[in-house]
Image (cartoon, rainbow, N blue to C red):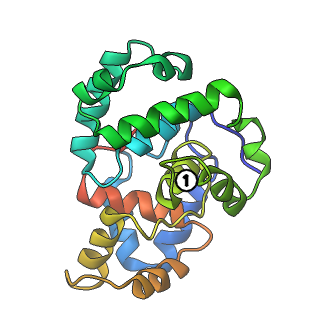
Amino acid sequence: MAVIAPPGTRPPWWPDASDALAACDPVMAGVITAWTGRGHLSSRGDPFTTLARSIVGQQISVKAAQAVWLRFEKAAGTMTPQRVARMRLTTMTGAGLSTRKAEYVRDLAKHFVAGSVDPAHWPSLDDEAVIDELVQVRGIGRWTAEMFLIFNLLRPDVFPLDDLGLTKALAIHYNDGRPVTRAEAQALGERWRPWRTLATWYLWRSLDPLPVDY
């Protein structure tokens, strides 16, 4: 299984995945070519930060999530579970988090401090097992768990069907701009196994050139 990668690490499977998808899908080849040499998926390397950023980013745009995170990071001073667990909700909401997200992020921090969330064994679990464990934490649903698999564990075959950016990009590139159904999105993803993470990342980039930094 993959290990938790240090910050900035490019997935070792990235070149092979890029070549494989470009070879099997002309549309994806064009999306990949447009971005080649301009960046790649990389990990922040810190499980708490990855999960907290994913909660902050729920149901808002990449740009809005980035702005809120920067304000929250400044308010925290030190982005550690110990620090965030002690923050007042009013301080967190003053940085732009909704009350519910502030509660979720602080609850996550308390789980880390208590040791009830322990990332040490996650690299030995398969994707669905990690998801099953993470969704037991308040405020973490499947989408958030999938973002963790992508941006922290750098798992190669994650396809977040509930992600609005992904479905929007699928509509633009594969359905003449018309919305795709969940079944249609799932069928498109099947052609990219076992490299659906790479397809997702490049489709995101086709909408927003600023890489998400979970």
Q: Give the total number of marks visible in the rendering.
A: 1
Amino acid residing under circle 1? Ala
> How far across and down, in percent of the image, does residue 58 sit?
35, 51
Crowding at mark 1 (Cα within 10 Å: few <14, some 14-19, many 20+): many
State the residue position of label 1: 145
> How far across and down, in percent of the image, does residue 197 sit?
52, 60
Which residue sits at x=27%, y=70%?
A: 168
Which residue sits at x=35%, y=66%?
A: 166
Res 77 visible: yes
Which residue sits at x=68%, y=27%?
A: 114
* Above-or-below relation of 192 to 2: below
In the drawing, does residue 49 fall left or right of residue 4? left
Q: Indicate the secondary structure of the residue bearing disc 1.
A: helix
Please identify the residue farthest to the top as the structure is shown.
77
Residue 113: quadrant of the picture: top right
* Above-or-below relation of 64 to 59: above
Nearest the viewer among 124 and 135 is 135
Nearest the viewer among 103 and 28 is 103
> How far across and down, in percent of the image, does residue 79 sit?
46, 20
Which residue sits at x=22%, y=43%?
A: 63
Res 7 visible: no
Nearest the viewer among 43 and 123 is 123
In the drawing, does residue 28 fall left or right of residue 190? left
In the drawing, does residue 71 fall left or right of residue 44? left
Which quadrant: the C terminus?
Answer: top left
> How far across and down, in percent of the image, does residue 43 sit?
53, 38
